[in-house]
Amino acid sequence: MEWYDFALYGYFATVIAKLFFPSQDQVFSLLMTFGAFASGFIARPLGGIIFGHIGDRYGRRVSLLISISLIVLPTALIGLLPTYESIGIAAPILLTVFRLLQGIAVSGELTGSGIFLLECAAEGRKGFYGSLVMCSTYLGLLIGAAVSVLVSLFYNDTELLGFAWRIPFIISFFFGLCAIFLRMKCQESPIFEAIRLQNKIIKRPVVSVCKQYAPSIFLISVLSGVLAVAIYLLIGYFPAYFIANLHMTLNQSMVVSFVGLFTLTLCVPLVGRLVDRVGAYKVFAVGAGCFLVGSYVIFDLLVRGGSISAMACVTLTAIFLSMIAASILPIITAAFPANVRCSGVSVGYNISMSLFGGTTPLIAMMSCQYFGVETAPAGYLILSAFLSLLALYFLNKNNNSHKTAPFHLESFEMGR
């Protein structure tokens, strides 16, 4: 649900730029649009604190119910929002406010659902179940891409600018109601129930985890950087680049993006099975290493032009990214004991998404402008991969648990 919403903003970035940030300079309009996109990530550390506290204090299920409820309304309101032509400067301001609300809500989603499912998963299956969480994320993006493609097929450019771009945002409200109903039927995590029965719930879990596990929070923030940069290149920067620089139509851009997301969605659960066999740390290291040596190839394919090169670009990105996505949740979730797990993971992961993720399309465009080379963003992806490998190394030294199992299973119980 949440990533369906995020996908819509990326795929309709050029439309939103014209309607909410009109300018004679197309690059400037896109920069402003990606600036509003990034604003949703400014609130994510705050949201991580809020939902981390709720998850550790009141339960994983409660946190997930609140987060999905909060994301439904602002997304529907974006679809109903008047444009700059109608209400002037209030339009981009309100758009940014709704993005901030989305950022707060989404901060509890992926980490909360990941922790919930991993705590319910059988031993030896946590890698696969963790990959399903990430797979559902990309499935949401894929559905967003599919709906966007369908809308662009049924309506011409004039109709898209007029009203058709609003349709996918508005129908997300009904998806949200289905998600809320499903979560109301879920039972609480058995590990949280054990914490509750043993009276080990901490009143201020965020304060406690920051005092006792600050190095782990820092390391998972850096570790998650390559995931953040790669996914927001794929769903945010690449589609806009195809239109603005390769002169693709909106429909062509969405089709290429759909191929990348389909590849990613297909590969993640397959790699998840591998994680249970060889270990999360090894799979993550291979994925980050691929970005370290292959980022320039990705951007070389991007700037060549043509649909074949564009599809090769997104496919290669998706294959490398699948190794990161399938292995990251077991690593970061096992870094904290159960009674402060939501707080530690939510704070660390959302700091990374805020610093590396939402700013990625903006930094990619600015680096091209500054260096005058369209392959310049490759350097940012390489840097994020290098830093993630360093973080993995130090996290490995701090937690030797993966030497006896793909990842530390005892940390999913009552502590390390």
Image: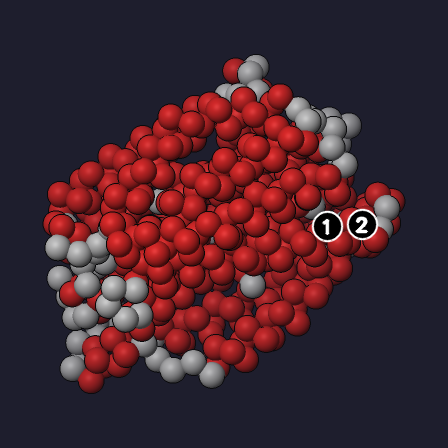
Quarter location, residue 356: top left
Name the residue at 42% across, 27% down.
Answer: 294
Q: Which residue is mark 2?
A: 153
- Horizontal side of 159 relative to 27 (left or right) equals right
Q: Residues within 10 Å of mark 2 (few under 14, many from 20)?
A: few
In the picture, the quarter occupied by the C terminus is: bottom left
- Horizontal side of 157 relative to 131 (left or right) equals right
Name the residue at 76% across, 36% down.
Answer: 249
The local secondary structure at tag 1 comes to helix
Q: Position of residue 295 (x, y in %)?
A: 44, 27
- Horizontal side of 278 relative to 42 (left or right) equals left
Residue 302 visible somewhere in the drawing = yes
415 is higher (above) or lower (below) than 290: below
Q: Position of residue 402 (x, y in %)?
A: 17, 52
Q: Nearer the viewer, residue 125 or 232?
A: 125
Report how far apart the C-alphas of labels 2 and 1 lie in the structure: 6 Å
The local secondary structure at tag 2 comes to helix
Name the residue at 56% across, 25% down.
Answer: 301
Asked if disc 2 and disc 1 are in contact, CB closer than 8 Å, the reply is yes
Q: Return the mark for residue 149.
A: 1
Quarter location, residue 166: bottom right
Q: Residues within 10 Å of mark 1 (few under 14, many from 20)?
A: many
250 is higher (above) or lower (below) than 105: above
Residue type at numbered disc 1: Val
Q: Position of residue 219 (x, y in %)?
A: 25, 44
Residue 39 visible somewhere in the drawing = no
